[in-house]
Image (cartoon, rainbow, N blue to C red):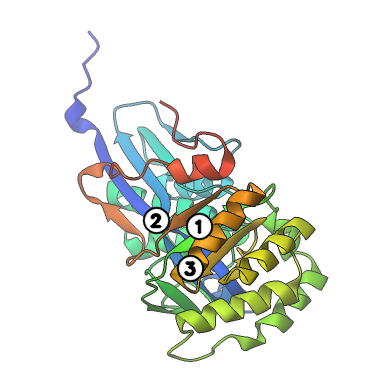
Amino acid sequence: MKRAISSDRVRRAAAFAPGHITGVFAPDLIARDPRARGSRGAGVVLALGVTAEATWDPDGPSKLLLTSGVAGSLTISEDVARRLVADRAGLVRVRLTHQLPVGQGFGMSAAGAVATGLSLANLFRISRQHALEVAHLADLFGGGGLGGVAAILGGGLETRIRAGIPPYGRVLHRPFLRKILIGVVGRPIPSPRLLRNPEILGRISSAAEQLPTSPPGFTPSGFLAASERFTDEVGLTTAGLARTLRAVRACGGWAAQAMFGRSFFVVPKTPGGRARIVAELERRGHPFVEVSASSVGAMPLRGGSRPESLDGAAASILTGRPSGPPP
């Protein structure tokens, strides 16, 4: 007779990793150890991100299943899962929920990698540092970002003054209390293609000379002004995105491209400016949402399940289609 499988044998864990917008950066890939590669730069860690819910049934068939509501494969998160599951026996499931669109400069590849890594680290009692290093390397070599994993280990305004995953890299965090409007004006931009283009990399390096190289890093207003200059000097905006940025700035806001996406982030300078900016974005028909900066970085979730607030609503607004995991 076949033995019934006890649900007590199934282990569960969950983790959340925030999204992130980069306003200015410079690739730094010269270190011999890839854990010390990535980028110097600055951005804001968002309150919206990716949740990973993982289960392990050691009595099930030896198989790894990673699912999400995102169209297409999530090769970076899948790579993290494969490396951490390794040759463990049993059925491992990882379900990802993305609150923001993938491929639009909102840090979803890094957030997915980190959430996957931390959930599996909890499940298998792997060290947090090892899981983060695996996530960093998967994002670095998988064509995601060049510093997104390091950036989201804390909250608020982050300044990466030394490339790499800490402790190889160094990231400064300070509070960012302003609300941010983020929106999308076109299809995603393939980051790997841009990051292999010598002309674009040259423009990025030249525009990034304003980056701080020592503490205390950027102030919020200094970061926003630097992001506008970086957007204008690098010149990756489409004509439509450039027009939107100019219009929003004229309404009284800091406005820049989220690197790399056909997307923008805006911080109003005054309450009156916010009202004008919202009216302008609505007039142009661009989908947008207002988000807060996260006060904390990536973390495991207690109880092995995601908070009710992580429902993917923002991604649905920005993409026009549901973003949650399949039932």
Q: Quadrant of residue 279?
A: bottom right
Amino acid of disc 1: Ala
Q: CA distance from mark 1 to mark 3?
A: 35 Å
Residue 64 visible in the snapshot: yes
* Residue lying farthest to the right in this orientation: 199
Query: x, y percentage for residue 220?
Result: 46, 79
Query: x, y percentage for residue 186?
Result: 69, 49
Residues under numbered marks 2 and 1 in contact, where contact means CB atoms less than 8 Å apart:
yes
Left or right: residue 198 compared with residue 60? right
Position of 111 relative to 3 (above/below): below
Q: CA distance from mark 2 to mark 3?
A: 33 Å
Secondary structure state at the residue bearing disc 1: helix
Q: Residue at x 38, y 79 (%)?
A: 174
Q: CA distance from mark 2 to mark 1?
A: 8 Å
Q: Which mark is residue 110?
A: 1
Position of 306 relative to 289 (above/below): above
Secondary structure state at the residue bearing disc 3: helix
* Mark toward the start of the polypeptide (2 vs 3): 2
- In depth, the one of 294 and 109 nearer the eye is 294
* Residue lying farthest to the top in this orientation: 1
Secondary structure state at the residue bearing disc 2: strand
Q: So how many labels did they put on this image?
A: 3
Query: x, y percentage for residue 248?
Result: 62, 65
Position of 28 relative to 194 (above/below): below
Disc 3: which residue: 272
* Mark toward the start of the polypeptide (1 vs 3): 1
Q: Which mark is residue 17?
A: 2
- In depth, the one of 28 and 50 nearer the eye is 50
Query: x, y percentage for residue 162?
Result: 52, 82
Amino acid of disc 3: Gly
